[in-house]
Image (tube, helix red, strand yellow):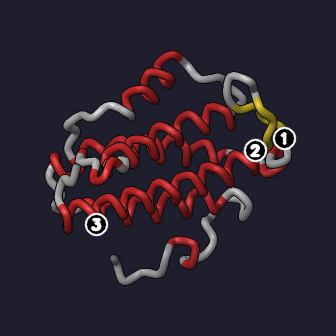
Amino acid sequence: MSGLPEPWMRGPIEGVDVLAAPVLYAFQQAREELRQHTEGLTAAQLWARPYGFGSVAFHVLHIAGSTDRLMTYLRGGALTPEQLACLERELQAGMHSREELLAEVERAFAAAEAVVRALDPATLRETRGVGRQRLPTTVIGLLTHIAEHTQRHLGQAIAAAKLVRVCGNIP
Protein backbone atom coordinates (compact mmCIF):
# COMPACT_ATOMS: atom_id res chain seq x y z
CA MET A 1 0.00 0.00 0.00
CA SER A 2 1.04 3.63 -0.25
CA GLY A 3 2.00 5.16 3.07
CA LEU A 4 -1.31 7.01 3.10
CA PRO A 5 -4.25 6.27 5.38
CA GLU A 6 -7.37 4.84 3.74
CA PRO A 7 -9.18 7.35 1.49
CA TRP A 8 -11.95 8.08 3.98
CA MET A 9 -9.28 9.25 6.47
CA ARG A 10 -7.66 11.70 4.06
CA GLY A 11 -10.12 14.49 4.72
CA PRO A 12 -13.18 15.90 3.00
CA ILE A 13 -13.41 15.88 -0.77
CA GLU A 14 -13.59 19.45 -1.93
CA GLY A 15 -16.82 20.34 -3.69
CA VAL A 16 -18.60 17.08 -2.75
CA ASP A 17 -21.38 16.90 -0.18
CA VAL A 18 -20.33 14.87 2.86
CA LEU A 19 -23.26 12.50 2.33
CA ALA A 20 -22.21 11.75 -1.25
CA ALA A 21 -18.47 11.51 -0.55
CA PRO A 22 -18.41 7.91 0.76
CA VAL A 23 -18.96 6.52 -2.74
CA LEU A 24 -15.90 8.44 -3.96
CA TYR A 25 -13.87 7.11 -1.03
CA ALA A 26 -14.97 3.58 -1.98
CA PHE A 27 -13.87 4.13 -5.57
CA GLN A 28 -10.44 5.41 -4.53
CA GLN A 29 -9.94 2.50 -2.14
CA ALA A 30 -10.94 0.04 -4.88
CA ARG A 31 -8.53 1.64 -7.37
CA GLU A 32 -5.62 1.41 -4.97
CA GLU A 33 -6.30 -2.09 -3.68
CA LEU A 34 -7.11 -3.61 -7.08
CA ARG A 35 -3.84 -2.25 -8.42
CA GLN A 36 -1.94 -3.64 -5.44
CA HIS A 37 -3.56 -7.08 -5.26
CA THR A 38 -3.57 -7.81 -9.00
CA GLU A 39 0.07 -6.86 -9.50
CA GLY A 40 1.94 -9.73 -11.13
CA LEU A 41 -1.10 -11.94 -11.76
CA THR A 42 -1.10 -13.70 -15.12
CA ALA A 43 -4.17 -13.68 -17.36
CA ALA A 44 -4.75 -17.32 -16.37
CA GLN A 45 -4.66 -16.37 -12.68
CA LEU A 46 -7.00 -13.44 -13.25
CA TRP A 47 -9.59 -15.75 -14.81
CA ALA A 48 -9.03 -18.81 -12.58
CA ARG A 49 -12.05 -19.94 -10.54
CA PRO A 50 -10.52 -21.76 -7.58
CA TYR A 51 -13.04 -24.06 -5.90
CA GLY A 52 -15.69 -22.63 -8.24
CA PHE A 53 -15.56 -19.15 -6.71
CA GLY A 54 -15.71 -16.08 -8.92
CA SER A 55 -12.48 -15.12 -10.62
CA VAL A 56 -10.56 -11.94 -9.87
CA ALA A 57 -11.47 -10.76 -13.37
CA PHE A 58 -15.19 -11.40 -12.83
CA HIS A 59 -15.20 -9.27 -9.68
CA VAL A 60 -13.24 -6.47 -11.36
CA LEU A 61 -15.58 -6.46 -14.38
CA HIS A 62 -18.60 -6.64 -12.09
CA ILE A 63 -17.40 -3.63 -10.09
CA ALA A 64 -17.16 -1.64 -13.33
CA GLY A 65 -20.43 -2.91 -14.82
CA SER A 66 -22.51 -2.62 -11.66
CA THR A 67 -21.23 0.91 -11.07
CA ASP A 68 -22.34 1.87 -14.57
CA ARG A 69 -25.76 0.22 -14.17
CA LEU A 70 -26.43 1.65 -10.72
CA MET A 71 -25.45 5.13 -11.89
CA THR A 72 -28.05 4.79 -14.64
CA TYR A 73 -30.69 4.23 -11.96
CA LEU A 74 -29.29 7.14 -9.93
CA ARG A 75 -29.84 9.41 -12.95
CA GLY A 76 -33.42 8.07 -13.18
CA GLY A 77 -32.85 5.97 -16.31
CA ALA A 78 -33.44 2.39 -17.35
CA LEU A 79 -30.74 -0.02 -18.48
CA THR A 80 -29.90 -0.10 -22.17
CA PRO A 81 -29.55 -3.31 -24.20
CA GLU A 82 -25.78 -2.67 -24.20
CA GLN A 83 -25.70 -2.56 -20.39
CA LEU A 84 -27.68 -5.82 -20.19
CA ALA A 85 -25.25 -7.44 -22.64
CA CYS A 86 -22.36 -6.22 -20.50
CA LEU A 87 -23.92 -7.96 -17.50
CA GLU A 88 -23.98 -11.23 -19.43
CA ARG A 89 -20.34 -10.81 -20.50
CA GLU A 90 -19.23 -10.39 -16.88
CA LEU A 91 -20.14 -14.01 -16.32
CA GLN A 92 -18.16 -15.34 -19.30
CA ALA A 93 -14.50 -16.14 -18.94
CA GLY A 94 -12.30 -14.10 -21.20
CA MET A 95 -8.69 -13.19 -21.38
CA HIS A 96 -8.63 -9.46 -20.64
CA SER A 97 -5.28 -8.37 -19.32
CA ARG A 98 -4.86 -6.78 -15.92
CA GLU A 99 -4.44 -3.40 -17.59
CA GLU A 100 -7.66 -3.82 -19.58
CA LEU A 101 -9.58 -4.83 -16.44
CA LEU A 102 -8.27 -1.88 -14.45
CA ALA A 103 -9.04 0.45 -17.35
CA GLU A 104 -12.67 -0.74 -17.31
CA VAL A 105 -12.92 0.07 -13.61
CA GLU A 106 -11.30 3.46 -14.15
CA ARG A 107 -13.71 4.29 -16.98
CA ALA A 108 -16.74 3.38 -14.85
CA PHE A 109 -15.44 5.23 -11.79
CA ALA A 110 -14.54 8.37 -13.74
CA ALA A 111 -18.03 8.56 -15.26
CA ALA A 112 -19.67 7.90 -11.89
CA GLU A 113 -17.49 10.46 -10.13
CA ALA A 114 -18.55 13.14 -12.59
CA VAL A 115 -22.19 12.44 -11.74
CA VAL A 116 -21.53 12.44 -7.99
CA ARG A 117 -19.53 15.67 -8.15
CA ALA A 118 -22.39 17.37 -10.03
CA LEU A 119 -25.06 16.00 -7.68
CA ASP A 120 -27.25 18.57 -6.00
CA PRO A 121 -27.41 17.60 -2.30
CA ALA A 122 -31.09 18.57 -2.33
CA THR A 123 -31.75 15.46 -4.48
CA LEU A 124 -30.39 12.94 -1.95
CA ARG A 125 -33.87 12.12 -0.64
CA GLU A 126 -35.46 11.85 -4.07
CA THR A 127 -36.97 8.51 -5.04
CA ARG A 128 -35.43 6.38 -7.77
CA GLY A 129 -36.52 3.07 -9.27
CA VAL A 130 -34.18 0.11 -9.61
CA GLY A 131 -34.45 -2.81 -12.00
CA ARG A 132 -37.15 -3.80 -14.40
CA GLN A 133 -39.70 -3.61 -11.60
CA ARG A 134 -38.46 -0.11 -10.68
CA LEU A 135 -38.16 -1.06 -7.00
CA PRO A 136 -38.15 2.07 -4.86
CA THR A 137 -35.03 3.56 -3.30
CA THR A 138 -33.54 7.03 -2.97
CA VAL A 139 -30.50 8.79 -4.39
CA ILE A 140 -28.68 8.38 -1.04
CA GLY A 141 -29.77 4.72 -0.96
CA LEU A 142 -28.22 4.16 -4.38
CA LEU A 143 -25.01 5.96 -3.41
CA THR A 144 -24.78 3.83 -0.27
CA HIS A 145 -25.34 0.65 -2.24
CA ILE A 146 -22.80 1.59 -4.92
CA ALA A 147 -20.15 2.15 -2.23
CA GLU A 148 -21.05 -1.05 -0.35
CA HIS A 149 -21.29 -3.17 -3.49
CA THR A 150 -17.93 -1.90 -4.72
CA GLN A 151 -16.31 -2.80 -1.41
CA ARG A 152 -17.97 -6.24 -1.28
CA HIS A 153 -16.62 -7.22 -4.71
CA LEU A 154 -13.27 -5.60 -3.96
CA GLY A 155 -12.93 -7.93 -0.97
CA GLN A 156 -13.90 -10.94 -3.07
CA ALA A 157 -11.39 -9.96 -5.78
CA ILE A 158 -8.64 -9.64 -3.17
CA ALA A 159 -9.51 -13.02 -1.64
CA ALA A 160 -9.55 -14.66 -5.08
CA ALA A 161 -6.18 -13.07 -5.93
CA LYS A 162 -4.65 -14.37 -2.72
CA LEU A 163 -6.10 -17.83 -3.33
CA VAL A 164 -4.75 -18.16 -6.88
CA ARG A 165 -1.33 -16.94 -5.76
CA VAL A 166 -1.15 -19.66 -3.11
CA CYS A 167 -3.08 -22.51 -4.68
CA GLY A 168 -3.16 -21.87 -8.41
CA ASN A 169 -6.19 -22.84 -10.46
CA ILE A 170 -7.81 -25.41 -8.21
CA PRO A 171 -10.80 -27.15 -9.74
Residue at x-position 69% and y-position 45%: 142
Amino acid type, residue under disc 3 in the picture: Lys
Residue 4 as seen in the image, left or right of residue 38: right
Which residue matches tag 3?
A: 162
Q: Nearer the viewer, residue 28 or 146?
A: 146
Crowding at dot 2, Cα within 10 Å, few <14 / some 14-19 / many 20+, comes out as many
Q: How far apart are labels 2 and 1 at the CA level?
A: 6 Å
Vertical arrangement, residue 70 with respect to residue 30, above or below = above
Question: Looking at the image, do the residues carrying marks 2 and 3 touch, with CB atoms under 8 Å apart?
Answer: no
Camera sees residue 121: yes
Among numbered discs 2 and 1, the one appearing first in the sequence = 1
Vertical arrangement, residue 2 with respect to residue 130, above or below = below
Circle 1 SS class: loop
Residue 70 as seen in the image, left or right of residue 101: right
Task: Say which quadrant the N terminus sits in.
Answer: bottom left
Camera sees residue 102: no
Which residue matches tag 1?
A: 126
